[in-house]
Amino acid sequence: MSRGVRLPLLPMLALLAHCSGAPGIEVPPPTDDAVDPSDVPLTRATHEQRASFFKGNALFDAPFGDSDGLGPLFIHTNCRSCHTEAGKEPGVVEKMVVIDREGGPAADQSKLPFGHTVRQQVAAGATTPILAPDDPTIRTTTRIGLSLLGRGYVEAIADSEIERVAAEQDKRVDLIGGRINRVVYASETNPDTTFGAHTGGEVLIGRFGLKARIATLDDFTADALQGDMGVTSPLRPAELPNPDALLDDGKPGVDVEADFVNDVANYLRLVEIPPRRGLRDRGRQLFERVQCSICHVPSLRTRADYPVAELRGVDAPIYSDLLVHDMGIALADGIADGNANWREWKTTPLIGLRFSRTYLHDGRARSVEEAIQMHASSGSEAGGSIRLFNVLAESDRQELLTFVEAL
């Protein structure tokens, strides 16, 4: 499964890992000959964890072919296609939904018998891709690859912390009031129960994906392998329904072992939050004044029993409440996910923004300021916050933007 992996780079990447500072700690700006890496292991990672990180990273980069189990339908051939250096983009996934007159999802979705995701590439004997029908009642939207930086911190956050923030927001008298997306664990039980012995159908707190539709990193990994590449595993052993009714691909049976899924998931758990540079107190105060910090909560406490010792019982600086919020009509895509409705999106963790070039779920914003202004979509919970932002003095707006861009 390692075909195409650039293993000679691993010693260099291991060296670059030493450049990473502790999360949330300000460090001096890089000099001309310094390196500013994003995809590096936890600062205090052990030797064994570093080995696990680089092993999983290699699998994350490895492309699949027909003989590896690619297809029958797929979107990309490897994980890296959507998440270069564990960051956002360059990959894009196209979604589709039958809408009603109000722009929401129609009760009848039978025009999309194979679901809401476009899978435009075929392999292993398939001849019919899944494409959006030419129909005015079908809305198509795009989603760019998510940043995966610091996702071990996200998985480690205690359920009680997410529930606490949701309860606090529920008491507010303004529009802000995020909800927990309680989702069904859709994979089979992982043979490795280090990170939980979850069973199919169990209801958990969602925290991964644009609408927080997945609860754990092993489920997230197995779902991406199956959904984006048509690669099955013991966690997701079945090929997805397809127009050609193919039940297998060029590799009979499941395509990868559970160890493959767990190695990639462990790599994601071990990706560090890049050091933040230039987080000035004035910017932090303004972030709170305009109420950004209500949803983009600067830190949440992690579990005391999380299996990765470096992530136990710490204040994880993820700048998110991990709740889903109504972001209004203009940002709605018409697709419900778990307990998240068609207008709701998860508060995106603000991690590694200096590596980003586009913002929001579909990359429509080309700057942090554009993304902030687009939060004012009609009916959005963030409307009041945007009004507070817009009445700031120009110097204060720039101070706040500089702060956010440094996250």
Image: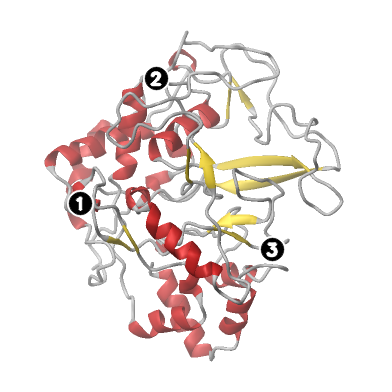
The residue shown at (54%, 50%) is: 181
The residue shown at (53%, 12%) is: 249
Instruction: Determine which quarter of the picture holds residue 59.
Output: top left
- Residue 223 at what x, y percent from top left? 49, 32
Instruction: Determine which quarter of the picture holds residue 109.
Output: top right
Q: Name the residue carrying label 1.
A: 310
Q: Amino acid at mark 3?
A: Gly
Q: Residues within 10 Å of mark 2 (few under 14, many from 20)?
A: many
Q: Is residue 335 left or right of residue 196?
A: right
Name above or below for residue 227 compared with residue 362: above
Q: Name the residue carrying label 2.
A: 256
Q: Name the residue carrying label 3.
A: 328
**The N terminus sits in image quarter:** top left
Under circle 1, the secondary element is helix
Instruction: Determine which quarter of the picture holds residue 299.
Output: bottom left
Q: Amino acid at mark 2?
A: Val
Label 2 vs 1, first from the N-terminus: 2
Kindly identify which numbered label has been placed on residue 88. Answer: none
**What colouring style does the render use?**
secondary structure
Under circle 2, the secondary element is loop
Label 3 vs 2, first from the N-terminus: 2
* Mark in front: 2 vs 1: 1
